[in-house]
Amino acid sequence: MFKTDVKIKDFPVTEQPRERLLKYGPDTLSDAELLAIILRTGTMGMNSITMCQQIFASANLKKLSRSTIQELVKIRGIGMTKACQIVSVFELSRRLETYTDEPKPKIRDPEDIYRVMYPKIREEKQEKFMVLCLDTKNQIISIETIFIGSLDSSIVHPREIFKTAILASAASIILVHNHPSGDPTPSHEDIVITNRIIEGGKLLGINVWDHLIIGDGSYISLKRENLV
């Protein structure tokens, strides 16, 4: 039985919920201990575990999951912040039950790339270099920002780009960056960098599908323009 007036940090390490979770996994903890990790602190004269044990003594998990904030704040030790934390956890759990992956955007041509990326990049005041990772069906798996700032060969390292692609298990990638000036005309450096990345992709078996440069309401596809 846990002592009500002893702080969790003063427990032996082997009895501290967070340390046990890290070592043995969440399924080894009781409901009260899991909730105590979320709430973090107890109340005056009562540590978080004891407080959570008392919560579950008066309401089982199902009843607690249906409690409103107004009902929760009536429990000793549960103020507005803790009530919001509890409600948020159970709401995430409910959403998980009905969660399904949305269809992944499929890339067929440069216009598709532009349609996906322009809203994400149009307000940027600095150059932002991004990578779209695609699966074997040309569907977007992930979109990652690799660099922010003026592009030059000293900072755009293919290894960072392909590390992202490998972690995403990408079959191919698309490079995208913006020109804050609004003019998407590629520079010599843009072309040099793209060719370096394409050559790196050949060695790794990851196709570089295109490189899109986005300006103010317009774009240029280096592949379509036969620049790479």
Image (cartoon, rainbow, N blue to C red):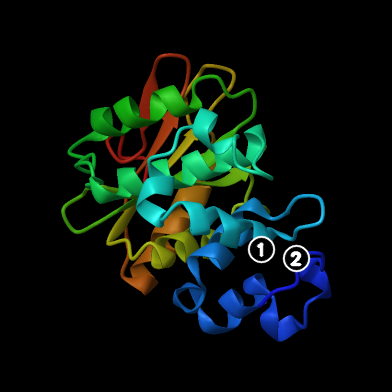
Judge from the rendering whether residue 66 lies leftward or rightward of residue 36; answer left or right: left
Judge from the rendering whether residue 202 lies leftward or rightward of residue 64; answer left or right: left
Compared to residue 180, the image places residue 186 above or below, namely below
Question: For the residues marked 2 and 1, what is the alpha-carbon distance in whole angstroms?
Answer: 6 Å
**Residue designated by label 1:** 50
**Residue designated by label 2:** 4
What amino acid is at disc 1?
Thr
Labels 2 and 1 touching (C-beta < 8 A): yes
In percent of the image, x 49 and y 27: which residue is there? 121
Q: Is residue 14 visible?
A: yes
Q: Nearer the viewer, residue 165 or 80?
A: 80
In percent of the image, x 63 and y 72: which residue is there? 17
Judge from the rendering whether residue 187 lies leftward or rightward of residue 134; answer left or right: right
Q: Helix, strand or loop at disc 1?
A: helix
In percent of the image, x 47 and y 25: which residue is there? 185
Q: In x, y percent, where is residue 140?
A: 29, 47
Compared to residue 27, the image places residue 90 above or below, namely above
What amino acid is at disc 2?
Thr
Q: Is residue 132 visible?
A: no
In percent of the image, x 55 and y 53: which residue is there? 55
